[in-house]
């Protein structure tokens, strides 16, 4: 698996600065969006941009459960679910224009790629009244998967793809009732063991993802599942590989978290809505925070009470994109300033993807 607005003739300037966009060929971008049709329920569609978000072309329906992992401009993988409830792995060799589907029944699998060739797949398979947990590894970009680990699943459910920070150290999040535990491996996935269960159970809250940016420093986001506290979330951090957790070290109180994005072991961003009455998320606005030391300290880099962002992605410490409504924005200074670069009327953007990098609304 983050960052006052003044509108100036089509340009959005954050923190008083307009970003320069001069650069050689931008990386390809993919986005999932919902066409706002006059009748029927909208279905997400998959779009491609080759000019840094300025122009988008529809390429396919979004059939997946998770945004795709694009290993190159042409090759990508993801997981999907058919209308009858069976799961499949989806593979593209043409940049997402078409997908080859490989059904695997009731097994639910999630993938993570550390490089374009090295990746892991974690799957849970119902079997004779129990659930079998397996982890496999691929060294050829997902063409072949070698089983590494299998055991009876200890209960609860897997809620995140494997999160590997190097070829040895990886993490998987498990929820069991009101509690959650991060399972860890230190040998490339051959064995997994649970770190200490999270000691604080928040009634009505459920984890939605885990992100480790080093073998020791990690993050878990919990979001409210109750109607009385919609949109509220809590961000936990660990500095010892998941053995203990503390709340939101270095960040100010936030009403919720929209996106958490670590580009490296040091560079990370948190995107959050503005705080409204009674500490709840405001109906409009965002605030963006950045760390350059792995999350030990965070600084506010941009905020707006007028613009709402639903997706966010950085591809270098300076270059990134965000989506709000039907508009795409670009930053070239690490999130301090943003330029409106593209608008697709009738499309509500839901997620952004670049090469082997994903950002999405995780509330």
Image (cartoon, rainbow, N blue to C red):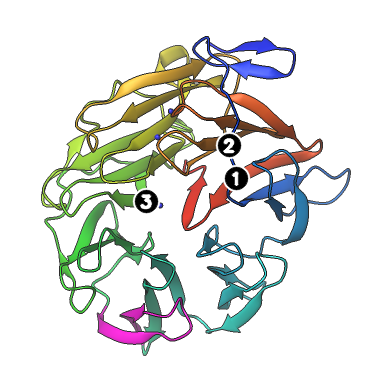
Pick the front one: 59 or 34: 59
Marks 3 and 2: which is nearer the front?
A: 2
The image shows residue 308 at horizontal and vertical percentages of 58, 25
Q: Which mark is residue 26?
A: 1
| Residue found farthest to the front | 24
Disc 2, SS: loop
Which residue is denoted by mark 3 in the rendering? 209
Q: Residues within 10 Å of mark 1 (few under 14, many from 20)?
A: few
What is the C-alpha distance between the residues marked 3 and 1? 29 Å
| Residue found farthest to the bottom | 128
Which residue is denoted by mark 2 in the rendering? 23
Q: Is residue 122 left or right of residue 194?
A: right
The image shows residue 335 at horizontal and vertical percentages of 46, 27
Residue 354 visible in the picture: yes
Question: Magenta span covers which residues?
Answer: 129-152
Q: Are marks 3 and 1 in contact (CB under 8 Å)?
A: no
């Amino acid at each position: 698996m983050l960052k006052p607005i003044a509108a100036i003739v089509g340009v959005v300037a954050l923190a008083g600065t307009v970003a320069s966009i001069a650069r050689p060929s931008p990386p390809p971008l993919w986005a999932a969006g919902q066409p706002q049709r006059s009748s029927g329920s909208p279905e997400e569609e998959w779009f491609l941009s080759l000019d840094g978000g300025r122009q988008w072309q529809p390429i396919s329906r979004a059939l997946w459960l998770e945004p795709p992992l694009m290993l190159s401009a042409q090759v990508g993988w993801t997981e999907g679910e058919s209308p009858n409830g069976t799961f499949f792995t989806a593979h593209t060799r043409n940049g997402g224009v078409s997908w080859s589907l490989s059904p695997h029944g009731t097994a639910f699998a999630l993938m993570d790629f550390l490089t374009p060739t090295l990746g892991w797949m974690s799957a849970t398979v119902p079997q004779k009244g129990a659930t079998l947990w397996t982890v496999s590894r691929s060294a050829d970009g997902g063409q072949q998967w070698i089983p590494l680990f299998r055991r009876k699943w200890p209960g609860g459910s897997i809620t995140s793809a494997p999160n590997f920070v190097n070829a040895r150290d990886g993490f998987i999040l498990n929820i069991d009732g009101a509690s959650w535990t991060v399972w860890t491996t230190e040998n490339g996935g051959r064995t997994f063991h649970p770190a200490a269960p999270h000691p604080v159970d928040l009634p009505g809250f459920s984890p939605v993802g885990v992100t480790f940016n080093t073998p020791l420093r990690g993050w878990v986001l919990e979001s409210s599942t109750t109607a009385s506290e919609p949109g509220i979330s809590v961000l936990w951090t660990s500095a010892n590989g998941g053995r203990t957790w503390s709340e939101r070290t270095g960040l100010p109180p936030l009403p919720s978290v929209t996106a958490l994005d670590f580009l490296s072991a040091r560079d990370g961003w948190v995107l959050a809505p503005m705080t409204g009455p009674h500490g709840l998320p405001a109906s409009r606005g965002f605030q963006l925070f950045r760390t350059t030391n792995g999350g030990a300290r965070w600084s506010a880099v941009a905020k707006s009470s007028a613009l709402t962002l639903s997706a966010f992605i950085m591809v270098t410490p300076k270059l990134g994109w965000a989506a709000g409504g039907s508009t795409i924005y670009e930053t070239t200074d690490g999130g301090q300033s943003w330029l409106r670069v593209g608008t697709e009327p009738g499309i509500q953007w839901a997620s952004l993807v670049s090469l082997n990098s994903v950002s999405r609304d995780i509330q």
